[in-house]
């Protein structure tokens, strides 16, 4: 339904230009896709950001952006609480949608978006961009081709330190804005998605342990960026109770009797944004660390271990399409946006929306919601919980 011819220009609108919106913008521009408009929390903010980012139109509202027939697709980089209503409105307006994760606040909402995307026949993607690191894709090829043998264990962590101090504050700490899960939904979801992407295995049941190490935080009484470059005084803060997890360790039962464990935390000093995984199989193992994304460790029992460097001439042929530069030229986080967005818009231009996608869709976002709900229930009830179907 709804083909898109080569000569019809694609124009994109972005909602939200905090940290992640400009990463989408850069990824779009690197694929020579025109971003012609944006919307922010206020019209004034939208005008300011449009001038800063070199975007021609600042819309007074999200509705106004959707009402513009020139806009082909929208990218949603708004706070979590808005994802459902924004994605739903975009689909109903006939726009293609690329949404930040989590897809919604509940699995009932995410199920509705999957249904609506199918009904409207629009291209839909969720930004699990970490799938597009070349060596993550290489690990996937190795697992799928049986090079690791039968899988035993999927283990790892996703650690950050940006919420280490009691004075660290962000909207994600507020359940009404970020959701009742924090570390698990924000970063744990990426790790969980990667493991299913690489192995093809779904999780059947979970046992989660949560901890909030900072049950009270100091919330600034004015927007934090007001103070950029200034030292805040004690009277500039108000005590705020925290109800979301700083830490989680989750035991995972995958299909085929594969076992897993992951630790997710946002209070680990010195860990800026480190996703690590190791996959252990009957023949060999692989491990990868997002702080060294151009190296893939391969472990053996009876021969020396090796490190595969990101190089188009050394990886499997299927991986080459997500590599932009020759070996020795490092690629990182911004390149994952370029590659994911490239995949989405190649698919959009090809026009056959019944074809299989090579990027994560709303269905992947919905699975992640089911998973997060089981994890949250497990932590609350201190027991194994099955993942909903």
Image (tube, rainbow, N blue to C red):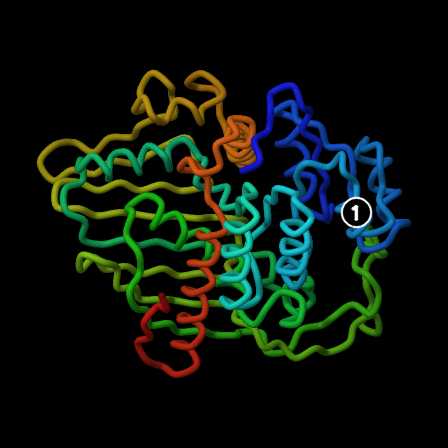
Residue 332 seen in this snapshot: no
Q: How many marks?
A: 1
User: Is 167 situated left or right of 158 in this image?
Assistant: right
Relative to 345, say whether 389 is above or below. Answer: below
Q: Residue furthest left?
A: 302
Q: Position of residue 15 (x, y in %)?
A: 72, 47
Q: Nearer the viewer, residue 180 or 364?
A: 364
Residue 358 seen in this snapshot: yes
- For label 1, the SS is strand
Residue where numbered disc 1 is placed: 39
Which residue is drawn at the image coordinates 64% and 68% (left, top)?
A: 173
Which residue is drawn at the image coordinates 86% and 35% (left, top)?
A: 51
Q: Residue furthest right?
A: 44
Q: Nearer the viewer, residue 85 or 306?
A: 85
Relative to 163, say whether 149 is above or below. Answer: above
User: Is 147 situated left or right of 162 in this image?
Assistant: left
User: Is 342 situated left or right of 198 in this image?
Assistant: right
Which residue is drawn at the image coordinates 65% and 43% (left, top)?
A: 95
Location of residue 28 (image quadrant): top right
User: Is 42 situated left or right of 134 in this image?
Assistant: right
Q: Nearer the viewer, residue 39 or 246?
A: 39
Q: Position of residue 44 (x, y in %)?
A: 91, 49
Location of residue 166 (image quadrant): bottom right
Location of residue 248 (image quadrant): bottom left
Q: Position of residue 83 (x, y in %)?
A: 63, 57
Question: Can you say which quadrant of the picture contains the C terminus?
Answer: bottom left
Q: Residue furthest front?
A: 1
Tell me if mark 1 has few (under 14), some (14-19) or many (20+) residues whose alpha carbon lies within 10 angstroms of its own. Answer: many
Q: Position of residue 142 (x, y in %)?
A: 24, 34
């Amino acid at each position: 339904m709804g083909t898109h011819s080569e000569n019809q220009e694609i124009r994109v609108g972005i909602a939200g230009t905090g940290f992640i919106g400009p990463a989408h913008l850069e990824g779009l521009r690197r694929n020579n896709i025109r971003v012609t408009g944006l919307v922010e929390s206020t019209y004034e903010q939208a005008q300011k950001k449009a001038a800063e980012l070199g975007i021609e139109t600042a819309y007074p509202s999200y509705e106004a952006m959707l009402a513009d027939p020139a806009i082909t697709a929208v990218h949603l980089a708004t706070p979590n609480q808005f994802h459902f209503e924004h994605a739903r409105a975009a689909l109903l307006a006939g726009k293609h949608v690329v949404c930040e994760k989590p897809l919604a606040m509940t699995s009932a909402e995410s199920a509705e978006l999957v249904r609506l995307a199918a009904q409207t026949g629009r291209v839909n993607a969720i930004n699990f961009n970490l799938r597009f690191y070349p060596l993550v894709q290489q690990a996937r090829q190795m697992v799928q081709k049986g090079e690791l043998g039968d899988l035993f264990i999927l283990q790892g962590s996703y650690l950050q330190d940006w919420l280490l101090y009691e004075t660290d504050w962000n909207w994600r700490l507020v359940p009404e804005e970020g959701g009742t899960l924090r570390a698990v939904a924000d970063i744990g979801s990426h790790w969980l998605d990667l493991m299913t992407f690489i192995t093809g295995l779904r999780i059947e049941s979970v046992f989660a342990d949560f901890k909030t190490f900072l049950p009270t935080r100091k919330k600034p009484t004015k927007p934090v960026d007001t103070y950029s470059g200034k030292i805040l005084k004690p009277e500039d803060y108000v005590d705020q109770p925290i109800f979301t997890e700083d830490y989680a360790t989750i035991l995972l039962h995958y299909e085929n009797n594969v076992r897993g464990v992951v630790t997710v935390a946002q209070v680990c000093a010195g860990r800026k944004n480190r996703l690590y995984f190791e996959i252990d199989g009957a023949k060999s193992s692989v491990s990868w660390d997002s702080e060294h994304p151009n190296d893939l460790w391969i472990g053996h029992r009876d021969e020396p271990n090796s490190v595969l460097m990101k190089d188009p001439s050394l990886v499997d042929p299927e991986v080459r399409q997500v590599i932009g530069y020759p070996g020795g030229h490092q690629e990182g986080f911004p390149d994952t946006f370029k590659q994911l967005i490239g995949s989405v818009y190649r698919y959009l231009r090809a026009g056959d929306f019944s074809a299989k996608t090579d990027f994560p869709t709303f269905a992947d976002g919905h699975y992640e919601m089911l998973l997060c709900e089981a994890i949250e229930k497990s932590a609350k009830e201190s027991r194994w919980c099955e993942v909903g179907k």
